[in-house]
Amino acid sequence: MLEVKSLVAGYAGSEVLHGIDLVVEDGEGVVVLGPNGHGKTTLLRAITGLLPPRSGAVFLEGREITRWRADVIAAAGIVHIPQGDLLFPEMTVLENLLMGAYHRPTWSERNRRLERVYDLFPWLKDRGSQLARTLSGGERRMLALGRGLMAKAKVMLIDEPSLGLAPLTTQQIYASIRQVKEAGMAILLADENANHVAGLADRVYLLETGVLVREGPADQLLKDKALLESYLG
Amino acid sequence: MTQTVQAVWGGVLFGSVYGLMALGLTLVWGAVRLLNLAHGALFVVGAYAAYWVTSSLHLPILVALPIGVLAAAGFAYAMHMAFIRPVLGKPGFDNSTLIATVGISIAVSAAALLIFNPQYKVVPPVLTGNFILAGVQITNQGLLVIGASLALFAAVYAYLTYTRHGMAIRAVSQQQEAASLMSIPVERTYGLVIAISGGLAGVAGVLLSPFFFLSPNSGFNPMIQALIVTIFGGLGSIRGALVAGFVLGIFESFVEVFYGVAWAQPGVFLLIIVMLIVRPNGLFGIGEVRRL
């Protein structure tokens, strides 16, 4: 589904990712675990074109999409739920959701897709006319997730969905993501907490200072407490 | 009585004209954060295109109107492709676009001079005739301008609120990265806004020119007035452009009728200075942080 080969990316003057190789198969839940500041967000941004990679290649269903514009990559079927939600603050909840379905073929099915999102987060339906900037942190995260689900995704990239949330809300968010995954969606999720991703991850990569240092099936890697502790602290 | 009716009529007419020009300006500011000092040039492009269609092709003004609007919109889009798009998101965007748009204004005036000669031109009105109301002469073209301005405000508002492309314009202006993650093409959306704004200036150019004579510099005053209205109403606010257009238009008209023409401009500026002291972001100012 999604394949990343020797990806190198960074910002002016500093290289953050030093050659990343990574695969997400159809319907697979892949988690990149790593401490803050080691390149998880950069990796997702490089894949979706928000930060054009310096070298390496990205393939979606075998087709190379490296250095495509972000909006073209999105239209090709990679949905990215970015860090910090990046909602449209002066637009209503409903308008935010509708923008998720902007891509023309999706737009004609927007009402059907709205119902699907409402099944997952029923409160969104009653609060449709509320401005996004007036939502609480947890509500924003759910709206960001719902907006992403409005698009027709082949694979979803989710950037640290627990960031800044209370434990109870965090649980709720991960339960929703598990539901999406169980419906057959391929997911690439970046996180710094191994406890969050149990039941969601099929495979896990460990990211340290811009390099993927370990890779393995989740049921083995997530049980190796000593290993996780040495990497994630 | 006659004086009051005169003041109200003049004010509503000025107000709708100011608002119409300010609408395009505030739209582009709100969406692109571009202060388009070529907005007056777009007015001139629309007006001269209509003049050319009526005088050289001898076609009726109702044919010339859409052609003028399309010419202004097309010119605005070309300006976007040539001068705005290359510097989008680059450092120095503000300065380079400011200089570029002033340059375009000068170039358009010079081109109009070369192509059409410096003599004043007459653009025929869409509607002729007038009637007397309480001793005041009401022109049908004036009523048309007021109606067109209000209708265009309503249309732009509905477009931004209810349509896929209109919502995308707001999305891009509020959160550009997220917009591109929703597969919204950011640069093309900017081009769309600038073209719409050009079309609005074109409408103003074709409909207003019959009130004055058309010359290569005809766009300058409407643009300055639009700038004033936009700042008064709050840069980037559509409601602000509408309300400020009428407030300033009616205020100016009343001062003119009751205190004489000489006091009209100073009075308007006094009002603006006071208003900006009280509300620095304008009447409906959305400030730096909030967007369209």
Image: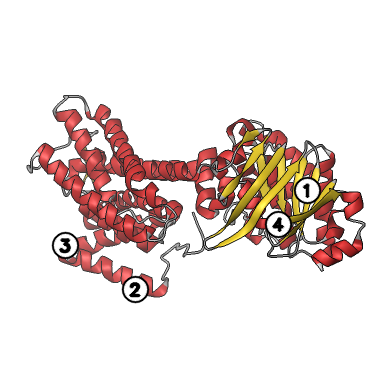
Q: Is residue A216 at all visible to an observer of this figure?
A: yes
Q: Chain of mark 3?
A: B
Q: Is residue B129 at all visible to an observer of this figure?
A: no
- The image quadrant of residue A162 is bottom right
Tag count: 4
The reply to whether callout 2 and callout 3 are in contact (CB within 8 Å) is no
Q: Nearer the viewer, mark 1 or mark 2?
A: 1
Q: Nearer the viewer, mark 2 or mark 4?
A: 4
* Residue topped by disc 2: B274
- The image quadrant of residue B7 is bottom left
Q: Name which residue type carries label 4.
A: Val
The reply to whether callout 1 and callout 4 are in contact (CB within 8 Å) is no
Please report the residue visible at 74 percent of the width from the left and 47 percent of the height from the top: A188
Classify mark 3: helix, strand or loop. Answer: helix
* Towards the viewer: B240 or B80: B80
Please report the residue visible at 32 percent of the width from the left and 68 percent of the height from the top: B272
Q: Name which residue type carries label 1.
A: Phe
Q: Chain of mark 4?
A: A
Q: Residue A211, labelled with which disc?
A: 4
